[in-house]
Amino acid sequence: MRLTTGQELLPFRIRVQNFTGPDGSAFRTFRCIITEAGVKQAGNFQMLYSISDFIHVYVFGDRIGELVVSGICFGSFCGDAPGTPSGIEMAMSYYRNNRLAARGTPALIAVGGSANAAIFVAFLVGGEMKVINPETPVGQFAWQFNIISSSGAF
């Protein structure tokens, strides 16, 4: 959907591989919404101080980075078929099915909506799911990924 200025209604996108509901649709059945992504990256280096105020810098490339994807999840809605999983169950299921110990391969995560979006090769290494307000069945989830590289197209 676009506004009259040519800008997208949602100018910022986060796409996580396999983030779909049981029927394969991303938004109609997966009762979780990604609201935040945070990336932490650092170089792998050593700095040594020596005589006469010289500093020797040794660079060994990059360290493994961290990417946290989090959001909110919803309970079941009126009219759902019996046994329809809630959003927190879907978030837990995503973690169980895509964590490093179960999958063994990385997932691809795109942060941004343009052709220059950052694509991360990421391993799902941690997850947190919690109910924050039982009166209005709303919960939160957070998945922690270790990222080994970032590149171009998804």
Image (spheres, helix red, strand yellow):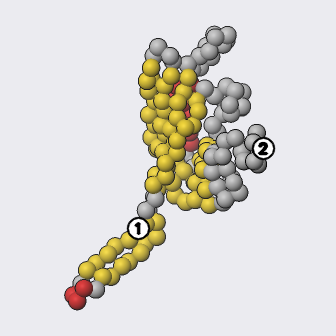
List x then y, in percent, for residue 132: 43, 24
Q: Residues within 10 Å of mark 2 (few under 14, many from 20)?
A: few
Q: Amino acid at mark 2?
A: Thr
Q: Nearer the viewer, residue 33 or 86?
A: 33
List x then y, in percent, for residue 103: 56, 42
Q: Is residue 78 above or below residue 57?
A: above
SS class, disc 2: loop
List x then y, in percent, for residue 40: 45, 55
Q: Is residue 9 above or below residue 85?
A: below
Question: Residue at 51% across / 18% down in the picture?
Answer: 137
Question: Between disc 1 and disc 2, whose residue precedes?
Answer: 2
List x then y, in percent, for residue 98: 56, 39
Q: Is residue 50 above or below residue 14?
A: below
Question: Residue at 32% across / 75% down in the picture?
Answer: 47
Residue under pointer 2: 4
Question: Residue at 52% across / 41% down in the picture?
Answer: 36
Count every numbered label the image shows and give the total. 2
Q: Amino acid at mark 1?
A: Asn
The single residue placed furthest to the bottom in the displayed view is: 52
Question: Residue at 63% across / 46% down in the picture?
Answer: 12
Q: Real-space Cα distance between discs 1 and 2?
A: 46 Å
Regarding residue 100, the answer to whether it shows in the image is: no
Instruction: Indicate left or right for 61 with 56 as reference.
Output: right
Instruction: Indicate left or right for 4 with 88 as reference.
Output: right
Quadrant into which the N terminus falls = top right
Q: Nearer the viewer, residue 152 or 37?
A: 37
The single residue placed furthest to the left in the displayed view is: 51
Regarding residue 52, the answer to whether it shows in the image is: yes
Residue under pointer 1: 44
Residue 61 circle label: none
